[in-house]
């Protein structure tokens, strides 16, 4: 099948490469000429395990190509995927300018029937807006051409995106047209072999399903962080509590890790956008508000602990930081808790020596030549002259370090662990002052 994908970011590029891998003829369109130039050479602008090989193989096989030529994109595919960003607007709503710009382009250039597939995360009612925009452009062109708009939200996780796309837990198709349903079923058949994963529903329910999934996951995290803060103050250990509640199959062990707050390009903006949607229709979404408030607070917990430990005297202190990406196996720094912490440390006069296995280029891009930030090529190198070590991201490489070496390298043996990677008793035996989340040492 011929497929065009607008937007070659995390979602668009993975979607394009995976659809090409199963035999389709895919053209990826992006307005970022630098990105397209890189991709044409088989260079991947993001860190995503397995993606580079997939892209290169499919370019070589002639099934995957890239362009900035929008008209060529509209001419190419029966399926026109929209996978552009939907960042938060100033008021917290999802900014639909990129989605509607693609709709405008499709209306401007289409010459025959097209199925417009919305993969971006968009508020309920967006498919109607996309349809209206295309229709109004066609009207201006004096054309009464047929097209369909389908909602097909994406559930891949950064860090496991290729695997998630190739072996999805669900494929949501929101449409009210049986013919489109059949065409999309055919498109997704290669990913639906093991058992039925395709769920067909009305467009609005499909749009809401994506927000519901992210809001639920964010709620789990904020719930555990709330409990962690309580545990700290009550003299309980949240890790014991986590194991105790996870054993109940109605609760389960997945996604109930306390930490230093959720980040990334999805949870923060999607919780906010759903809250905004609620407000617009006069509904008070108290739970969503609380999820966001708790997360904003949680992102400050590590700074509060550090501030308290050093009696507020952070000027001139050097803090070693392991992990910059918002989670392991990605270089994505959008809304990463590391940014909140680093910016608070700098404001207090401290400097940071950091390492991340994938996100250092992205950190350089964001913070440029900041004299209060030094990046090192190995975790242990960050410790020289440092007053404390902070764990921000639970990369595997940080899970079992040489504590003896850490102790001799740091000026004082103190660790602030935002991911509860270590055993408090062991660290105490090794002579560390160890601060974790929800395991003693309450922050003010
Ligand atoms: N990143 C994730 O893990 C993830 C997972 C599921 C869903 N989503 C959703 O998917 C959407 C895309 O997210 P992303 O992380 O891939 O974004 P991204 O920022 O990585 O990529 C978006 C791309 O779209 C391009 N673009 C913007 N306007 C364009 C236009 N008019 N024509 C062509 N290209 C254009 C940009 O240049 C950019 O390369 C968002 O709505 C997001 O919420 C993201």
Image (tube, grey):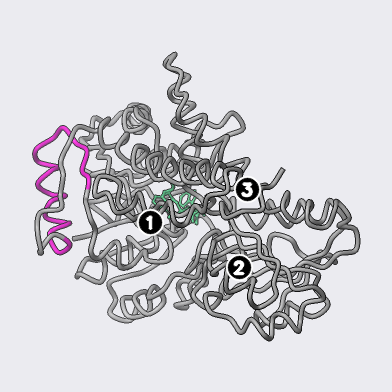
Q: As rendered, which of 130 and 199 lies closer to the eye?
A: 199
Which of the two discs, 3 and 1, labels the residue nearer the N terminus? 1
User: Which secondary structure is most common in the magenta stretch?
Assistant: helix
Q: Secondary structure at mark 1?
A: helix
Q: Residue furthest top?
A: 282
Q: Which residues are magenta?
A: 172-191
* Residue 187 on the magenta span: yes
Residue 80 x, y percent position in the rendering: 30, 49
The residue located at (47%, 78%) in the rendering is 41
* Residue 229 on the magenta span: no
Query: Which residue carries the number 2 mark?
Result: 323
Q: CA distance from mark 3 to mark 2?
A: 14 Å
Residue 216 x, y percent position in the rendering: 37, 40
Q: Label 3 neighbourhood size at 10 Å, few (<14), some (14-19), many (20+)?
A: many
Quadrant assignment, res 123? top left
Q: As rendered, which of 62 and 225 lies closer to the eye?
A: 225
Query: Which residue carries the number 1 mark?
Result: 243
The residue located at (57%, 48%) in the rendering is 235
Quarter of the image for the C terminus: give it: top right
Query: Which residue carries the number 3 mark?
Result: 299
Q: As rendered, which of 428 and 372 lies closer to the eye?
A: 428
Residue 114 x, y percent position in the rendering: 24, 44
């Amino acid at each position: 099948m011929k497929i065009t994908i607008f937007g070659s970011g995390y979602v668009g590029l993975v979607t394009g490469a995976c659809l090409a891998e199963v035999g389709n003829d895919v053209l990826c369109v992006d307005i970022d000429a630098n990105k397209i130039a890189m991709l044409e050479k088989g260079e991947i602008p993001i860190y995503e395990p397995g993606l580079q090989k997939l892209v290169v193989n499919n370019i070589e096989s002639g099934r995957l190509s890239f362009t900035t030529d929008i008209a060529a994109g509209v001419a190419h595919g029966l399926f026109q995927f929209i996978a552009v960003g939907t960042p938060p607007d100033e008021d917290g709503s999802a900014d639909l300018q990129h989605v509607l710009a693609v709709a405008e382009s499709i209306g401007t250039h289409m010459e025959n029937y097209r199925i417009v597939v919305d993969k971006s995360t968009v508020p309920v009612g967006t498919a109607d807006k996309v349809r209206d925009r295309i229709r109004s452009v066609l009207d201006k062109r004096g054309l009464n051409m047929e097209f369909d708009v389908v909602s097909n939200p994406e559930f891949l996780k950064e860090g496991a995106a290729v695997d998630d796309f190739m072996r999805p837990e669900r494929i949501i198709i929101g449409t009210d047209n049986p013919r489109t349903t059949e065409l999309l079923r055919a498109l997704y058949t290669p990913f639906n072999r093991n058992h039925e994963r395709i769920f067909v529903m009305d467009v609005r329910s499909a749009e809401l399903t994506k927000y519901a999934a992210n809001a639920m996951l964010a709620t789990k995290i904020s719930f555990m962080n709330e409990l962690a803060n309580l545990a700290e103050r009550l003299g309980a250990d949240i890790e014991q509590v986590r194991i105790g509640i996870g054993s109940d199959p109605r609760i389960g062990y997945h996604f109930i890790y306390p930490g230093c707050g959720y980040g990334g390009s999805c949870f923060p903006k999607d919780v906010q956008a759903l809250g905004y949607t609620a407000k617009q229709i006069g509904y008070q979404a108290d739970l969503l508000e609380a999820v966001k408030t708790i997360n904003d607070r949680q992102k400050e917990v590590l700074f509060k602990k550090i501030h308290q430990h050093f009696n507020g005297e952070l000027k001139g202190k050097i803090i070693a930081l392991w992990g910059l990406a918002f989670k392991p196996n990605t270089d994505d720094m959008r809304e990463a808790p590391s940014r909140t912490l680093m910016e608070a440390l700098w404001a207090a006069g401290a400097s940071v020596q950091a390492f991340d296995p994938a996100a250092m280029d992205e950190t350089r891009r964001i913070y440029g030549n900041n004299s209060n930030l030094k990046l090192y090529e190995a975790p242990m190198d960050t410790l020289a002259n440092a007053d404390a070590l902070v764990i921000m991201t639970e990369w595997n490489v940080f899970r079992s370090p040489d504590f003896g070496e850490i102790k001799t390298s740091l000026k004082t043996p103190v660790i602030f662990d935002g991911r509860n990677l270590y055993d408090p008793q062991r660290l105490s035996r090794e002579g560390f002052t160890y601060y974790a989340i929800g395991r003693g040492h309450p922050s003010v």
